[in-house]
């Protein structure tokens, strides 16, 4: 029967600690200069070395050659507090989770009165100190404030804010942090060498990622992989299956399908995720991790090796090819879609459906990351500068004498026939519809032009915020008076949601920025409830409908939003 890795390799001196120099160096300096306090508070995430550091500090204080910043390791106190030691009578470790009341505090006070049995100090280590009740802390307060000369306190906790302020103010507080991935990766590589274990490439980065910066959790996972491997060799396939991550080959398959816009391959990969029993949320998270790596590779080129540690040169070359197939803009856009899907999956009843919809959205963007063109009238497909007919001088005898009687006046005035060119074929008209309008069109912005450009505004808004797009899609552009836009919503709750702002962001601001990008005008709003109204721009109200500004509409109560 073997001892767990995290116990066999528990540090025995501050010099063996990794990633906690902000704690170890000040403590070693205090020990060298004989400025040791009477009470310490060690706080930080679980498994980052708080209790281990408390034991090392106890060894340094009670070492026969101390107090010293480096325990000798040979005296009785150092041996008893070492890895294989059974503990010292003068170092009392208390689990505060089960000894947290007033009676336990009174018992501790009685034990603190007696002098150490052998060593220099009697040291009390209270683990999980945040579990002590306020009454228990108050019972300890006087002892912690003015302890006997031979008593030292070390509190270890993951939640320092739950330790009452009167106790915290009487301690030296040292915050521990999670160990950075680079330092952790180097440490586990060294440990595998000492253990004589062969590890396939890609395994240790997965272990470090799964450990989340906690040395104890990382070593526990590595110990599990080593115990479940044959011939002292940890394979990548077994590590992926045990840790629950997505295999790199499957991620490559999905990324290549996205780059080639191959829907069949992309959905086949998604089906493999589901059929093999993997968690769709984990797959989306792993895909986001891969997209992040591709963005780094695209941005840094050959310098990516300094950021993506633990990845072989062969893998970096393959990722460079994938990044080049997308481009930075498209990679960023796909990453935004994946992040939104990951958020939507929280609490979702059908994560597979969310995953498949995400794949559909990514594929629908197509090359270049452009948004899917929204079906719009013919007039909205041409540049916005030509969307509105120019005013015809009444004194010009050669001006056209008749206008079309249908609602397609803008199309008749700005279509290809009006310019004297042949109409584009259906094959060439489809790509032209996806071209964005110039950001700042010339000429005045009227209600009619706003309604014609409304699908383009919604298309841009969808790329910014899906929720804002859904809310604006249900609104009707009722009137435009200068820069004041009146929007009619079908319910009062939609009006309230539209007006919500948090840190200067919200649906109203998102829509304002989309209108500014398409039409070059920064609008203010009048948001009102109109139960008889319907969603849309020109399709709902018509290009020449007088109802939004008529007397009947003016009589309705309005909620004005002058933000921005």
Image (tube, helix red, strand yellow):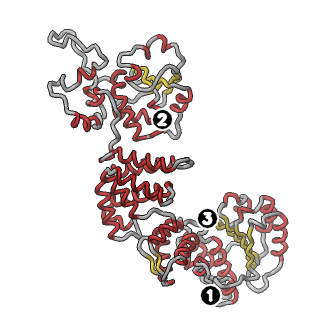
Name the secondary structure under disc 2: helix
Give the Cα distance between marks 1 and 3: 28 Å
Residue under pointer 3: 44
Residue under pointer 2: 507
Image coords of residue 205 (percent x, y): 45, 69
| Residue at the bottom extreme, as displayed | 74
Image coords of residue 224 (percent x, y): 56, 74
Q: Could you tell me which quadrant the N terminus lies in?
A: bottom right
Image coords of residue 370 (percent x, y): 32, 43
Q: How many marks?
A: 3
Q: Is residue 378 visible?
A: yes
Which of the 4 image quadrants contains residue 381? top left
Give the Cα distance between marks 2 and 1: 65 Å
Q: Is residue 182 visible?
A: no
Chain-order first, disc 1 or disc 3 = 3
Q: What label sits on residue 72 in the rendered view?
A: 1
Q: Residue at x 34, y 28 (%)?
A: 453
Q: Residue at x 37, y 36 (%)?
A: 459
Q: Residue at x 43, y 14 (%)?
A: 547
Q: Nearer the viewer, residue 414 or 442?
A: 414
Q: Is residue 12 above or below residue 474?
A: below
């Amino acid at each position: 029967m073997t001892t767990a890795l995290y116990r066999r390799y528990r540090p025995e001196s501050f010099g063996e600690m990794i990633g906690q120099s902000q704690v170890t160096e000040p403590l070693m300096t205090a020990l060298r200069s004989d400025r040791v306090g009477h009470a310490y508070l060690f706080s930080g995430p679980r498994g980052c070395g708080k209790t281990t550091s408390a034991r090392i500090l106890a060894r340094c204080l009670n070492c026969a050659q101390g107090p010293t910043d480096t325990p000798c390791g040979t005296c009785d106190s150092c041996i008893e507090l070492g890895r294989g030691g059974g503990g010292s009578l003068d170092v009392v470790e208390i689990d505060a989770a089960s000894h947290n009341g007033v009676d336990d505090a009174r018992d501790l006070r009685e034990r603190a009165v007696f002098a150490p049995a052998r060593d220099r100090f009697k040291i009390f280590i209270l683990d999980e100190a945040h579990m002590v009740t306020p009454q228990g802390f108050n019972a300890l307060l006087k002892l912690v404030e003015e302890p006997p000369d031979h008593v030292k306190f070390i509190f270890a906790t993951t939640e320092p804010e739950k330790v009452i302020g009167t106790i915290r103010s009487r301690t030296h507080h040292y915050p521990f942090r999670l160990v950075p991935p680079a330092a952790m990766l180097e440490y586990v590589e060294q440990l595998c060498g000492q253990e004589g274990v062969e590890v396939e490439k890609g395994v240790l980065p997965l272990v470090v990622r799964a450990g989340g910066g906690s040395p104890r959790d990382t070593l526990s996972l590595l110990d599990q992989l080593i115990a479940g491997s044959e011939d002292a060799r940890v394979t990548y396939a077994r590590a992926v299956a045990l840790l629950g991550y997505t295999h790199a080959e499957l991620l490559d398959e999905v990324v290549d399908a996205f780059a080639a816009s191959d829907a069949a391959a992309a959905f086949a990969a998604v089906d493999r995720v589901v059929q093999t029993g993997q968690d769709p949320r984990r797959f989306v998270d792993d895909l986001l991790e891969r997209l992040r790596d591709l963005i780094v590779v695209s941005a840094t080129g050959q310098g990516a090796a300094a950021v993506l540690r633990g990845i072989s040169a062969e893998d970096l070359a393959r990722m460079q090819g994938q990044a080049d197939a997308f481009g930075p803009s498209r990679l960023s856009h796909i990453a935004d879609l994946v992040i939104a899907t990951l958020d939507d999956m929280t609490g979702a009843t059908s994560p597979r459906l969310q995953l498949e919809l995400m794949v559909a959205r990514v594929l629908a963007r197509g090359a270049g990351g452009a948004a899917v063109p929204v079906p719009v009238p013919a007039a909205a497909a041409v540049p916005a500068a030509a969307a509105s007919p120019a005013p015809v001088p009444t004194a010009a005898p050669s001006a056209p004498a008749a206008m079309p009687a249908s609602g397609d006046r803008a199309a008749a005035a700005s279509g290809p026939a009006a310019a004297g060119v042949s109409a584009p074929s259906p094959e060439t008209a489809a790509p032209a519809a996806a071209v964005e309008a110039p950001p700042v069109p010339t000429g005045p912005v009227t209600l009619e032009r706003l309604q014609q450009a409304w699908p383009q505004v919604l298309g841009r808004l969808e790329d910014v915020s899906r929720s804002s797009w859904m809310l604006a899609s249900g609104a009707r552009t009722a009137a435009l008076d200068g820069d004041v836009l009146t929007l009619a919503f079908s319910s009062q709750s939609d009006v309230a949601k539209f007006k919500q702002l948090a840190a200067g962001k919200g649906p109203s601001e998102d829509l304002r920025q989309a209108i500014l990008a398409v039409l070059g005008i920064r609008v203010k709003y009048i948001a009102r409830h109109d139960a008889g109204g319907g969603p849309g721009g020109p399709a709902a109200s018509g290009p020449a409908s007088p109802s939004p500004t008529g007397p009947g509409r003016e009589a309705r109560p309005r909620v004005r939003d002058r933000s921005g």
